[in-house]
Image (cartoon, rainbow, N blue to C red):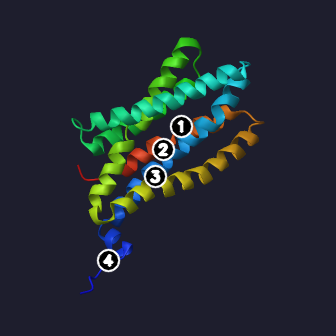
Amino acid sequence: IKEKTESIIQIIRPKAKLIFFLFMIVTLRSTTRVVFVNFLSLFIKQRQLSLMIGAIVLFVFSLSTAVGTFLGGYISKWVSRRNLLIYSMSASSPLLILMLYSNGSLFVVLLILSGIISSCSNPANLAIAQEAIPKGASTASSLMMGASWGVAAVIAMFFGIIADHFGGNVVPAMAISATLPIVASLFAIPIPK
């Protein structure tokens, strides 16, 4: 007896709007992260600091995003996933912008906090997508992690054009990209609690 299988389109269609919102959240957040990861060492160099300092800053930022992803899964036990998306995206933008205009110890604290907070919604986003389409959980994962990251990398190229427009100064491009999580938080509002 041959079983009838559903196409991925049939599986996603009932939850297409939710998947689109989640895709936009990940794409916008990931665009910001790609821009910051690519420009942090240039940012440090433009501040007349060594490339070694730039490497350390990049390491600390990357490590803090990993910690944030881990903490996000833990926090989502007590806070609704939707609220975690909204709050983490809304809080990360001001922290990232303040970081760009700070120095010394305050810079390091904001670097760590912005990395943690901007990435703590990753597990919630993935869990919402997988629960929305349980028959296509692997497709949900690939849309949230693979496709959206690829689109984010393409969008991030335009921030290089913005930096070039400002004579190679990466701060305006990074500041503009830091506003994207605010836009991402708007896509989280219609997500069911």
Q: Which of marks 1 and 2 is in front?
A: 2
Most distant residue in the right direction: 167
Q: What residue sits 56% from the left and 54% below the top?
A: 150
Residue 158: image tag: none
Q: Residues within 10 Å of mark 4 (few under 14, many from 20)?
A: few
Q: Which amino acid does label 4 sit on?
A: Glu
Residue 12 higher or lower than 23, as above or below: below
- Mark 1 or 2, nearer chain start: 2
Q: Name the residue under label 3.
A: 145
- What secondary structure is found at the residue carrying circle 2? helix
Rendering coords of residue 97 (x, y %) = 54, 29
Q: How far apart are marks 4 and 2 (CA)?
A: 32 Å
Horizontal and vertical percent position of residue 39: 65, 35
Classify mark 1: residues with Cα within 10 Å, few (<14), some (14-19) or many (20+): many
| Residue underneath mark 4 | 6
Specify which label sits upstream in the sequence, 3 or 1: 3
Dot placed on the residue nearer the N-terminal end, 4 or 2: 4
Which residue does the image show at 37% across and 72% down from the upper left? 8
- Sequence-wise, the earlier of marks 4 and 1 is 4
| Badge nearest the viewer, 4 or 1 | 4
Distance, label 1 to label 2, CA atoms, is 9 Å
SS state under label 3: helix
Q: Do the residues labelled 3 and 1 touch (CB within 8 Å)?
A: no
For the residue marked with disc 1, what is the amino acid? Ala
Under mark 3, the amino acid is: Met
* Of 101 and 193, the residue lying toward us: 193
The residue that appears at 37% across and 40% down in the rendered structure is: 121
Mark 2 → mark 3, Cα distance in angstroms = 12 Å
Q: Residue 130 placed where, x, y %?
A: 31, 56
| Residue, disc 1 | 178
Residue nearest the observer in this picture, 110 or 6: 6
State the residue at coordinates (40%, 32%): 68
